[in-house]
Amino acid sequence: MSEIYETVIGLEVHVELATKTKIFCGCSTAFGGEPNTHTCPVCTGMPGSLPVLNKAVLEKAVAVGLATNCTITRKGKFDRKNYFYPDNPQNYQISQLYFPICRDGKVEIEVGGEKKFIRIHEIHMEEDAGKLVHDPFTDTSLVDYNRSGVPLIEIVSEPDMRSADEVNAYLDKLRLIIQYLGASDCKLNEGSMRADVNLSIRKVGEEKFGTRTEMKNLNSFKAITRAIENERERQIDLIESGEGVIQETRRWDDEKGYSYAMRSKEDAQDYRYFPDPDLVPIIVDDEFLNSVKSRQPELRDEKRIRYKEEYNIPEYDIDIITNSKRMADIFEETISLGAEPKKVSNWLMVETMRLMKEHDVDADNLSFSSKNLAKIIEMVDKKVINGSVAKEVFEKVFTDDIEPEKYVEENGLKTVNDEGALTKTIEEIVAANPKSVEDYKSGKEKAIGFLVGQTMKAMKGKADPGEVNRILKEILSN
């Protein structure tokens, strides 16, 4: 029965901007800190305090708008969105209703080999609210205003998505664009990027939209997928049983796997919007706009094209490396220090990915320096260390970002280049393993692998395997 229904989805994506200070005051936006220590009269809504727009917020909002193909509003303003909630000290939120900073944009996504554009209705700037902290021992809620006034942009899409896969592809595209811009770290699990899902269903072929619900503050791709699938089935069940869908805001409980109603869905008039009288109009002149445009970095889609043309690495590697700005930066910085692109790609795709999995580290949180990776590659190229030692050294670089040369010196890991000593050891191995020698000489070439392994063991891993192979073959050919 569900196949006769089409899901219609639009998103409201809230992104915390990576500025040092809040949107309308000079208080720190640093995460953490003792409750109510990053506050002042402005961000706690004291009477008579006057907000002043942080220029960096406007710059980052415009940068995101340009990167998502939006039209930038050249003359705008802020509005007051009035509502009462304990973590909202002024009893209103400063936002933008009538003249959002960016409008009419679009981004391209790809799902299952099919490409489509998701239209962006608008992007507006606003301030975040504080945070309620519930104390179960006293059964009371306390308010921490450290987050109050942290700058946000809200990216509002058109209802162009039809599945959880498309939603996740759209969110991932936004995440990468914003991270590459340096506008936010976009960490869903830490709340710096969160999505409200507006969802309705209609029969396939119908043009009229159904009644939508909104699920608030979803902060993981897994939760978004489960919430969409659950809400779709809930609405279908309601319609099939003859009941109507109620326009409301719902909360998704990912642990229990269901949503429940929070309140009826408000419309703009419920918030009694009016222009904020304390903030001057926003004028984006040509000089400001050109300044932001001149600082726009190379985004992921552009990098993928350049990597394919400039570096001889597989497309799969390109996709993985460019899927994280941090990994792409490491890749390019290491090449700039003289390492070959293919070798850098191999280290990122094999050893780095392995250690990320073992240590449960996300690509965006890689902490080792490009300089130390470049040094390891150089030491292998110059045969200062061999491949197996390089892996051991890189693991220490990955976890502690140690200096490779110092670590190799202190731990006696340099490759033994004394041919006489190496030949003597190989002769001893050959003499001690007549069966393997006989097997090799009778045509079983794999037998040499055992002799190489025994030699490397005797040399404590500090020989060059290629040199060991060469000397072994010389001795065995006599």
Image (cartoon, grey):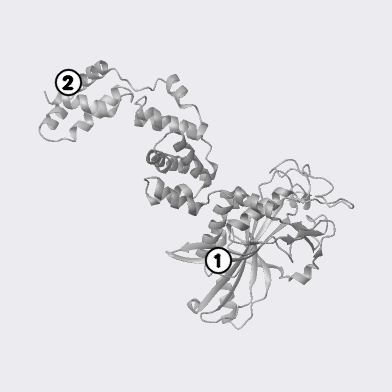
Residue 431 badge: 2
Asked if labels 2 and 1 touch by Cβ distance under 8 angstroms, the answer is no
Q: CA distance from mark 1 to mark 2?
A: 71 Å
| Mark 2 surroundings within 10 Å by alpha-carbon count, few (fewer than 14), some (14 through 19), many (20 or more) | few
124 left or right of 202 in image: right
| Mark 1 surroundings within 10 Å by alpha-carbon count, few (fewer than 14), some (14 through 19), many (20 or more) | many
Q: Camera-side residue: 326 or 354?
A: 326
Q: Please identify the quadrant where the C terminus is shown.
A: top left
State the image coordinates of residue 217 (x, y, percent, origin top left). Answer: 65, 59
Q: At 9% across and 33% down in the image, what residue appears?
A: 442
Residue lying farthest to the left in this orientation: 442
Q: Camera-side residue: 390 or 109?
A: 109
Name the residue tied to disc 1: 118
State the image coordinates of residue 316 (x, y, percent, origin top left). Answer: 39, 51
- Residue 200 visible in the current orientation: yes
Q: At 44% across and 43% down in the image, what residue appears?
A: 353
Residue 29: image quadrant is: top right
Inspect the image, locate mark 1, and give the three-letter code of the amino acid beneath it: Ile
Q: Camera-side residue: 197 or 144?
A: 197
Element carrying mark 1: strand
In the displayed structure, 454 sits above or below 171; it is above
381 left or right of 60 in image: left
Inspect the image, locate mark 2, and give the three-letter code of the amino acid beneath it: Ala
Residue lying farthest to the right in this orientation: 48
Q: At 54% across and 73% down in the image, what residue appears?
A: 7
Query: Reading the chain from its start, which is encountered first: label 1 or label 2?
Result: 1
158 left or right of 81 in image: left
